[in-house]
Image (spheres, rainbow, N blue to C red):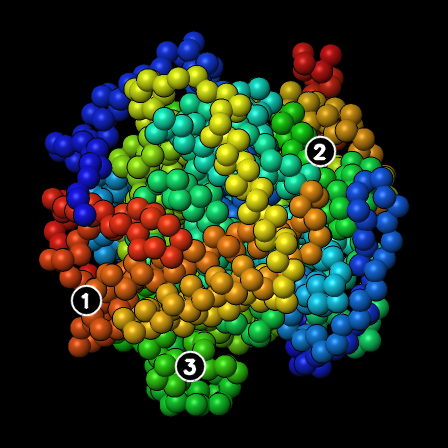
């Protein structure tokens, strides 16, 4: 249980990144082509990093599981991306974005990293605009902004309700330009199944070619994981179906510490679950809370149509509880408030697990065309899924798992505890602490990919000695053999339960006992139940087909096997953290008003866990967090 | 689309296209499904079919899907002869079973086009679309420090038109719906987005020439004004983008040094 070096620079926080860049080793432009960098994943972090490193002249290999890098799940982000441009003249600054993000993360993120994120946020907007990303504009041709949760300034840039798509297509076009130039080689439909650690450094990966089932080996001087989050451990989440933890988990098993797995974001505005067949949940952008008002009937079980419930019989509970932020309270706060209402019987809809998000007043105030221009595609999407028209009937929403703040531990260079292995974007744990504010995931993915990793990767490339390795090295042979055996074993079970069925059961345990409200008894039970379910998987899963062709069932089962290890670990992390902070709400630790109660004395640290074997208690390493610039305070949005 | 007008659940007879590989002739497999909730999405119905196939000892059908909310462009089915099914402006994953009636026979096939070889069952290879983008579907700007974003003004109407075109999700429905298997709506949308913006001007000519020539060389057909692409497009991208591409191509061919 030792503290360890986060390699954060010291000195005034506003100079740290500049100073650090000066202190980093450099690689001569003419020498860069001699170095190979593997980038796994092609979302915002992966595409941006691969394209940027390619432009700099490195030899880049980029892998993704989809048929095209453009389909990575960053594409689904709707609302926007923050930047401290202060174009609205409403008092924004790099320092304010930094402050809001540290506070929004409930003081569980590293100040130096967050400051750097705020600092490069402006460069991201410039970069994306130069790439031709069609951001929303005002009539004068300038960029438009909107507001998002957890902030009192308007700093969110957006492209209708498709900001993630447009930013990803910008990064993808930069990537395609490099593929065309020959600096990046693209490997679609490849899944990383293990990491090659040679002489203590990350030196390559083994992937499964999903079309042929063949295993392929790639050696490199550095490996960047940009493989997203692990929200699908809950089975139902807003993540795409293929989002998985496998690459990160395999790296964890090889020695990379995994930090704060229990910090999970439950997003307040999703379309409620409609039945057991449900395969995923759909998010309705947080931007809707700019104009929509959240409410429930005051009388429990009120079965009148929402339009027949008079004003005085409605409880606009966010406006009531958090008057200064109102409907734009941060995500963790808004989600928990919805749960409180539904648990008390105020929930609406057939299941009682929903609250209203009502645009009646906004339509009356601004007119339908204005609302349509802002949110038309989101309203359309809602109607498509639910069959009801949100211009006439309030939307029904409920929280759903959306994002994971935890991830592989990284230092200030985004390097994991395995030298040469860097982790970017949602896959790392670094910038959001215990809760992520809206419109900051896109910001972090692109900051890491465009601006941070391309500079810091030199600590491995130029800063360390290493032998040349080829894929003939015995480590590659051994890990390929292991991966092959694992899949053979999964296919060999031929039991009675489908992977989907087992995954659904895992999700149910996670949601009920490791979800929005957690307590020591439930968490201990969850860990045991998941451990038992893992046995069920290895003895009774049924996967059809063969290993040597496209076999989505096998892909899913192999990812599920890793989720079944992660799930237990996740519950243990939640159990060890005897406090409530951000998205981690322990029912034992709350104020008399039902707000999260942190314990800074004992838990002001990042919990970085070292793998000790499946079902074995991992070793805890604490990285103490110090707050020099944002004073530790109880978060209040009242 | 009114939920009230439909029963809560229906029975359907599925005919799923099965094909082991590009050389296999392929055939339909019949699956009868009972009590399918009309609130289910089409892909959730396929999930149920796969569970049933597994229970019967069969091999699950392969199909592409990922985000299941109409934005990643991965899903790609032809349903009763219609690309992405009977509803306008949606992807397969956004289609719900309330669009079907009790007792319906539903034929599910892959996107069929010479530019999209079949991989397995309902999965096709759409990598040709990436190759078209590689031929110029970008603005050449390295990561670094471009000018402040607000130093470049973009009129709102132009920005809106560019966004309309940029909404393309690259699913390839336009190609699959076109009798000529043309990729002109896909290519036209990207050419339009960048030609409409000031950032796109320096490479305006080389871009359209490169992308159109690559599109032609990959075996995609030409436009004969059928408008099937627009009808099938889940994002309802307008065919005026094809007209704009043709105009850009002509302008670049005769109006610039690169085109001569």
- On screen, residue A276 above or below A425: below
Residue neighbourhood size for the residue with mark 2, other residues' Cα within 10 Å, grouped as few (<14), some (14–19), many (≥20): many
* Chain assignment, label 3: A
Sequence-wise first label, 3 or 1: 3
- Discs 3 and 2 lie in a common subunit: no
Residue neighbourhood size for the residue with mark 1, other residues' Cα within 10 Å, grouped as few (<14), some (14–19), many (≥20): many
Judging from the image, what secondary structure is the residue with disc 3 in? loop
Q: Is residue A85 visible?
A: no
Give the residue number, with chain letter if any, for mark 3: A347
Give the residue number, with chain letter if any, for mark 2: B128
Q: Position of residue B143 (x, y in %)?
A: 42, 26
Residue name at image x 40 percent, y 28 percent: A198
Q: Position of residue A2 (x, y in %)?
A: 17, 44
Judging from the image, what secondary structure is the residue with disc 2 in? helix
Residue name at image x 49 percent, y 63 percent: A535
* Chain assignment, label 2: B
- Report the disc number at residue A411: none
In this view, the residue in front, A549 or A130, is A549
Q: What's the CA distance linking mark 3 and mark 1?
A: 25 Å
Residue neighbourhood size for the residue with mark 3, other residues' Cα within 10 Å, grouped as few (<14), some (14–19), many (≥20): many
Q: What's the CA distance linking mark 1 and mark 2?
A: 54 Å
Residue name at image x 21 percent, y 64 percent: A578
Q: Position of residue A330 (x, y in %)?
A: 31, 61
Mark 1 vs mark 2: give the one in front. Answer: 1
* In the displayed structure image, the side of residue B80 where residue A578 appears, left or right: left
- Discs 1 and 2 lie in a common subunit: no
Q: Position of residue A188 (x, y in %)?
A: 60, 36
* Chain assignment, label 1: A
Judging from the image, what secondary structure is the residue with disc 1 in? loop
Give the residue number, with chain letter if any, for mark 1: A597
Mark 3 vs mark 1: give the one in front. Answer: 1
- On screen, residue B46 above or below A6: below
């Amino acid at each position: 249980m030792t503290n360890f070096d986060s390699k954060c620079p010291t000195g005034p926080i506003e100079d740290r990144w500049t100073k650090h860049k000066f202190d980093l080793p450099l690689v001569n432009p003419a020498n860069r082509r001699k170095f190979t960098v593997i980038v796994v994943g092609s979302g915002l972090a992966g595409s941006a990093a691969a394209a940027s490193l390619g432009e700099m002249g490195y030899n880049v290999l980029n892998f993704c599981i989809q048929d095209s890098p453009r389909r990575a799940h960053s594409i689904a982000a709707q609302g926007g991306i923050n930047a401290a441009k202060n174009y609205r003249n409403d008092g924004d600054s790099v320092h304010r974005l930094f402050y809001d993000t540290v506070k929004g993360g409930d003081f569980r993120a590293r100040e130096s990293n967050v400051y750097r994120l705020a600092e490069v946020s402006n460069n991201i907007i410039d970069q994306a605009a130069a790439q031709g990303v069609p951001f929303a504009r005002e009539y004068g041709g300038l960029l438009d902004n909107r507001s998002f949760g957890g902030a009192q300034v308007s700093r969110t840039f957006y492209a209708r309700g498709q900001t993630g798509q447009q930013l990803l297509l910008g990064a993808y076009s930069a990537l395609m330009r490099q593929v065309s130039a020959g600096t990046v080689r693209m490997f679609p439909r490849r899944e990383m199944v293990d990491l090659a650690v040679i002489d203590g450094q990350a030196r390559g990966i083994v992937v499964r070619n999903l079309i042929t089932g063949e295993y392929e080996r790639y050696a490199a001087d550095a490996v960047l994981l940009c493989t997203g989050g692990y929200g699908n451990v809950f089975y139902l989440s807003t993540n795409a179906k293929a989002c998985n933890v496998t690459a990160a988990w395999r790296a964890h098993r090889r020695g990379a510490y995994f930090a704060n797995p229990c910090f999970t974001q439950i997003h307040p505005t999703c379309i409620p679950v409609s039945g057991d067949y449900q395969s995923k949940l759909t998010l309705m952008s947080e931007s809707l809370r700019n104009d929509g008002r959240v409410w429930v009937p005051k009388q429990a079980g009120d079965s009148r149509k929402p339009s027949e419930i008079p004003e005085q019989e409605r409880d606009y509970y966010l406006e009531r509880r958090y008057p200064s932020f109102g409907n734009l309270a941060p995500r963790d706060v808004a989600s928990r408030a919805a749960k409180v209402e539904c648990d008390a019987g105020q929930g609406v809809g057939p299941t009682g697990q929903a609250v209203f998000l009502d645009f009646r007043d906004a339509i009356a105030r601004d007119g339908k065309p204005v609302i349509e221009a802002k949110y038309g595609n989101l309203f359309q999407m809602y109607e498509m899924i639910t069959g009801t028209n949100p211009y006439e009937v309030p939307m029904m929403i409920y929280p759903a798992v959306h994002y994971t703040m935890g991830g592989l531990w990284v230092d200030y260079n985004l390097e994991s505890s395995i030298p040469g292995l860097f982790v970017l974007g949602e896959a790392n744990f670094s910038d959001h602490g215990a809760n992520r504010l809206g419109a900051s995931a896109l910001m972090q993915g692109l900051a890491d990919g465009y601006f941070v990793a391309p500079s810091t990767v030199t600590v491995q490339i130029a800063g360390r000695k290493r032998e040349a390795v080829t894929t003939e090295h015995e480590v590659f042979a051994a890990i390929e053999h292991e991966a092959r055996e694992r899949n053979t074993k999964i296919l060999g079970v031929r039991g009675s339960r489908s992977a989907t069925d087992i995954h659904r059961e895992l999700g149910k345990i996670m949601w009920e006992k490791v979800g929005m409200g957690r307590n020591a008894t439930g968490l201990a039970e969850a860990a045991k139940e998941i451990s038992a379910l893992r046995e069920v998987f290895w003895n009774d899963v049924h996967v059809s087909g063969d290993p040597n062709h496209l076999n989505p069932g096998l892909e899913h089962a192999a990812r599920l096997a890793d989720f079944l290890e992660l799930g237990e670990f996740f519950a243990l992390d939640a159990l060890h953290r005897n406090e409530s902070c951000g998205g981690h709400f322990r029912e034992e630790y709350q104020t008399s008003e039902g707000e999260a109660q942190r314990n800074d004395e004992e838990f002001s640290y990042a919990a970085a866990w070292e793998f000790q074997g499946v079902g074995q208690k991992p070793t805890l390493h604490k990285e103490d967090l110090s707050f020099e610039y944002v004073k530790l305070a109880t978060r209040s949005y009242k | 689309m009114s939920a009230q007008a439909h029963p809560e659940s229906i029975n359907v007879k599925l005919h799923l296209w099965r094909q082991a590989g590009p050389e296999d002739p392929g055939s339909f497999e019949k699956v009868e499904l009972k009590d399918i909730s009309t609130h289910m999405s089409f892909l959730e119905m396929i999930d149920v079919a796969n569970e049933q196939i597994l229970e019967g000892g069969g091999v699950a059908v392969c199909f592409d899907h990922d985000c299941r909310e109409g934005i990643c462009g991965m899903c790609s089915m032809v349903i009763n002869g219609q690309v992405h099914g009977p509803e306008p402006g949606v992807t397969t994953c956004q289609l719900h079973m309330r669009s079907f009636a009790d007792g319906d026979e539903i034929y599910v096939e892959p996107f069929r086009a010479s530019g999209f070889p079949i991989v397995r069952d309902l999965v096709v290879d759409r990598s040709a679309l990436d190759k078209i983008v590689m031929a110029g579907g970008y603005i050449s700007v390295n990561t670094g420090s471009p000018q402040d974003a607000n130093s470049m003004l973009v009129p709102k109407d132009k920005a809106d038109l560019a966004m309309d075109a940029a909404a393309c999700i690259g699913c390839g429905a336009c190609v699959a719906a076109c009798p000529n298997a043309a990729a002109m709506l896909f290519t036209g949308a990207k050419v339009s987005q960048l030609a409409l913006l000031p950032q796109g001007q320096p490479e305006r000519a080389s871009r359209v020439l490169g992308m159109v020539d690559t599109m032609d060389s990959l075996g995609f057909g030409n436009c004969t004004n059928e408008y099937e692409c627009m009808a099938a497009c889940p994002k309802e991208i307008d065919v005026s983008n094809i007209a704009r591409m043709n105009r850009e191509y002509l302008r670049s061919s005769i109006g610039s040094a690169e085109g001569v």
